[in-house]
Image (cartoon, helix red, strand yellow):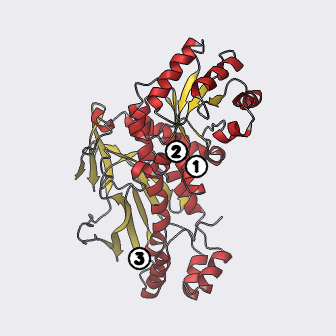
């Protein structure tokens, strides 16, 4: 399915005007960066690369797209002809998926003619801003949860396509599973799920509901115990399985108090191996608040898929250099509070004794190089896409987290984990 119309109209008007002015084929360099991390965040996590590369591969103007554009007087015949033959032939370099980023980190560099680079702006920003927002929030949740099982359950709180992207991003930053089946099919994310309150309410008694679920799933399932009376439900779950029920779930009330009471009850009934799962509008702060409670697993939904209060990381897409004959001209926006540095930049992370101390951005940055090739002369790196790309991003993220100083993982507001230095 073409992704060509997942864009803003002004991208095409710029292409059309550039075709007329003769500047459409001028070689350019665009960069993606954020001027600031969201308030209180000490680092961001770069996500969406695999999805973006696949979307660029599908960025084609076929007959239906061209007919719509021309029928609505959005483009003229010359522009339609250019779009019909459009295939991105430039190059894209950027931070690996799962990498950490900071203010002014050049996370993506797009090189190509003005027309073919500018037309990708909206697609690039819409994917990277959302996926990175979810990944950045999810990384904080993963740290708050420690080694406890963490599941993504936000599909019902997001657009159906965003839900899949969110599950993918969450898995990259260390979540264990998702409730979203499409994320499982498309990206290999492990899936999980048992039942909701409606299943219990459907049956004449809670016992009937539990028995039905156990008959289908066996004792290696999770029973939801707070539809009616928690204590009675836990006792019944233990009785029906001879104390072998894998887990019980709490979805309401004071979760810390409830989990403590349920743990004591399970232990007194001999079900010491039964796990306790908690859900109900969790975020990184409530997860951290449950650290001392006898909780074994968390399920997170709304806060994750909305970036836990920051649904975007503020990435922008700016022209930083263009060719003028045989030479290059560095350019930069000078609008108040929206300035940026011109010129193509490289990026590296300065690491001393295994700990990152600075983000180095400039023309010659020494340290651990952060940018890799994603598309070279129109040819995409297939290893970044699909389930294999997700696993590679997850492994890379876990690796680079180890470079951060301990203060980077504080949930309280504070300065970025490391400073950005222009060199």
* Vertical side of 145 occupied by 361: above or below: below
**Quarter of the image where one finds residue 326:** bottom left
Q: Which residue is mark 1?
A: 155
| Tag in front: 3 or 1 | 1
* Left or right of 153 in this view: 218: right
Position of the N terminus by quadrant: bottom right
Q: How far apart, in angstroms, are the residues tagged by discs 3 and 1?
A: 43 Å
Task: Find residue 344 and report its horizontal and vertical position in percent.
Answer: 32, 62
Res 17 seen here: yes
- What is the count of numbered marks? 3
* Left or right of 408 in this view: 185: right
Task: Give the residue drawn at x 45%, y 77%.
Answer: 25
Q: Which residue is mark 3?
A: 26
Q: Secondary structure at mark 3?
A: loop
Task: Find residue 324 and report its horizontal and vertical position in percent.
Answer: 33, 77
Q: Which one is earlier in the sequence, the residue at label 3 or at label 1? A: 3
Residue in front for this viewpoint, 130 or 376: 130
Q: Secondary structure at mark 2?
A: loop
Task: Give the residue drawn at x 36%, y 67%.
Answer: 318
Q: Secondary structure at mark 1?
A: helix
Task: Find residue 265 and report its horizontal and vertical position in percent.
Answer: 55, 17
Q: Which one is earlier in the sequence, the residue at label 2 or at label 1? A: 1
Residue 317 is tagged as none
Q: Which one is earlier in the sequence, the residue at label 2 or at label 3? A: 3
| Tag in front: 2 or 3 | 2
Residue 301 is tagged as 2
Residue in front for this viewpoint, 43 or 240: 240
Residue in front for this viewpoint, 136 or 4: 136
Q: How far apart, in angstroms, are the residues tagged by discs 2 and 1?
A: 7 Å
């Amino acid at each position: 399915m073409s992704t060509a119309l997942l864009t803003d109209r002004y991208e095409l008007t710029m292409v059309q005007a550039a075709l007329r002015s003769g500047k459409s084929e001028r070689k350019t360099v665009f960069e993606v960066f954020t001027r600031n991390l969201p308030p209180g965040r000490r680092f961001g996590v770069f996500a969406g690369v695999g999805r973006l590369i696949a979307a660029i591969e599908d960025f084609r103007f076929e007959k239906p797209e061209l007919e719509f554009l021309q029928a609505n007087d959005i483009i003229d015949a010359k522009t339609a002809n250019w779009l019909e033959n459009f295939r991105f032939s430039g190059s894209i370099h950027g931070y690996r998926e799962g990498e950490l980023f900071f203010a002014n980190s050049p996370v993506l560099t797009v090189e190509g003619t003005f027309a073919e680079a500018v037309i990708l702006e909206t697609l690039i920003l819409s994917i990277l801003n959302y996926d990175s927002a979810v990944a950045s929030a999810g990384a904080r949740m993963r740290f708050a949860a420690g080694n406890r099982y963490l599941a993504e359950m936000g599909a019902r709180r997001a657009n159906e396509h965003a839900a899949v992207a969110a599950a993918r991003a969450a898995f990259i930053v260390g979540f264990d599973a998702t409730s979203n089946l499409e994320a499982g099919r498309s990206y290999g994310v492990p899936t999980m799920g048992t039942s909701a309150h409606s299943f219990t309410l459907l049956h004449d008694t809670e016992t009937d509901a539990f028995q039905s679920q156990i008959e289908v799933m066996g004792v290696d399932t999770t029973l939801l115990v707070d539809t009616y009376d928690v204590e009675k439900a836990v006792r019944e779950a233990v009785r029906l399985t001879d104390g072998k029920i894998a887990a019980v779930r709490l979805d309401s009330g004071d979760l810390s108090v409830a989990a403590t009471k349920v743990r004591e009850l399970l232990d007194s009934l001999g079900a010491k191996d039964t796990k306790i799962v908690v859900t109900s509008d969790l975020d990184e702060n409530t997860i951290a608040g449950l650290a001392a409670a006898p909780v074994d697993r968390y399920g997170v939904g709304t806060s994750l898929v909305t970036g836990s209060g920051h649904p975007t990381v503020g990435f922008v897409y700016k022209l930083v250099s263009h060719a003028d004959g045989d030479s290059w001209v560095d350019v930069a926006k000078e609008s108040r509070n929206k300035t940026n540095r011109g010129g193509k930049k490289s990026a590296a992370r300065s690491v001393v004794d295994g700990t990152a101390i600075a983000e180095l951005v400039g023309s010659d940055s020494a340290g651990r190089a952060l940018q890799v090739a994603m598309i070279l002369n129109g040819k995409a790196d297939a290893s970044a896409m699909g389930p294999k790309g997700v696993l590679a991003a997850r492994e890379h993220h876990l690796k680079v987290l180890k470079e951060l100083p301990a203060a980077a993982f504080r949930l309280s507001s504070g300065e970025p984990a490391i400073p950005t230095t222009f060199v």
